[in-house]
Image: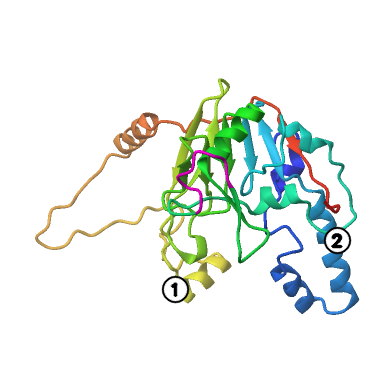
Amino acid sequence: MFFSILYSARYILLRGHQETFVTHDLYDQIACKFPGKIGDDICQKFKIVFSLMPVAAVVGNKILCVHSGISHEVKRSVDEWKKIPRTEVITRLSSITRDLLFSCPVDDDGVGADSDDPIFFISSANEYIKTFNEAAVTVFCEKTNIELIVRSHDAPPKGFRFFADKQLITIFSATTYNKKDNIAAFLRVDEEGVVSIVQMRPTEVTAMKPDDKKRKKSGETGKKSAKPGKKAKETPKKGSKEKTSDSKDNSKESKEENDGKKKKPTSKPSKELDSIYDNETDD
């Protein structure tokens, strides 16, 4: 959100399935903390903001980014979705918005998985959820001239998973999801449009004792230091040899060590991101 506000031309915060009024968890939390009219007003403002968020973005006219899936309601180009005006009128999600926020690739043993015909199957458990097979992805990419579809919504074990002959990739960029140590990943696109996958592993965090937390908060280290201007001398144990070290050699070794480390390459988006918005009107 922070980068989206500062660099609106480079960062686009996409709408996910959580940013809908179908999901009530957020509103239950608001109503618990702000009961009555204040809570209702806050919830209404959230709904308006959610309805104005983009549901998709196109990078370099070739990469389509969505939260969950694709829609069969496209004839030639995803630019058709841009013609739908944004509105603050809250009614219900349009069918295209539902597809982009909730539809998922079919499982290996799911309905139509082995079919050569494009299939969009509506779940019997939830009308919002559709599954689509590999043939549906291929037809969608051919019609829209899209080379890669990037989605999230699921958490693959390795942080990413390909589908439909690498025409679609599921990417998940949060480690320790649901308090579990999982591998995450993100995509990097260079100036030539070449896509690379960067994986991230959860960082090991050592739990601090309550006393250590208090010392850290107050600025105390809990260690006794030598008096200013004097170096603390270490008294060698009886029978052991005293070790000496040259500070200049240490600093030299440290410098060589730092110089030997490779700097992490920084990437900057070179192509303009094109937002696609949806409305919340009836079908």
Q: Which residues are magenta?
A: 111-119
Q: Dot 1 corresponds to which residue?
A: 209
Foreground of the two, 14 or 247 = 14
Q: Earlier in the sequence, mark 1 or mark 2?
A: 2
Foreground of the two, 271 or 103 = 103
Q: Is residue 245 left or right of residue 258?
A: left
Please say if the residues under marks 1 and 2 sit with CB atoms less than 8 Å apart.
Answer: no
Crowding around mark 2 (Cα neighbors within 10 Å: few <14, some 14 to 19, many 20+) is: few
Give the spatial CA distance, label 1 vs label 2. 42 Å
For image coordinates 72% across by 45% down, the residue present is 55
Expressed as whole percent of the image width and height from the top left, the position of residue 239 reads 9, 60
Expressed as whole percent of the image width and height from the top left, the position of residue 49 reads 82, 54
Figure check: 146 above or below 207: above
The tag on residue 45 is 2
Expressed as whole percent of the image width and height from the top left, the position of residue 104 reads 57, 51
Magenta span includes 21: no
Figure check: 42 above or below 134: below
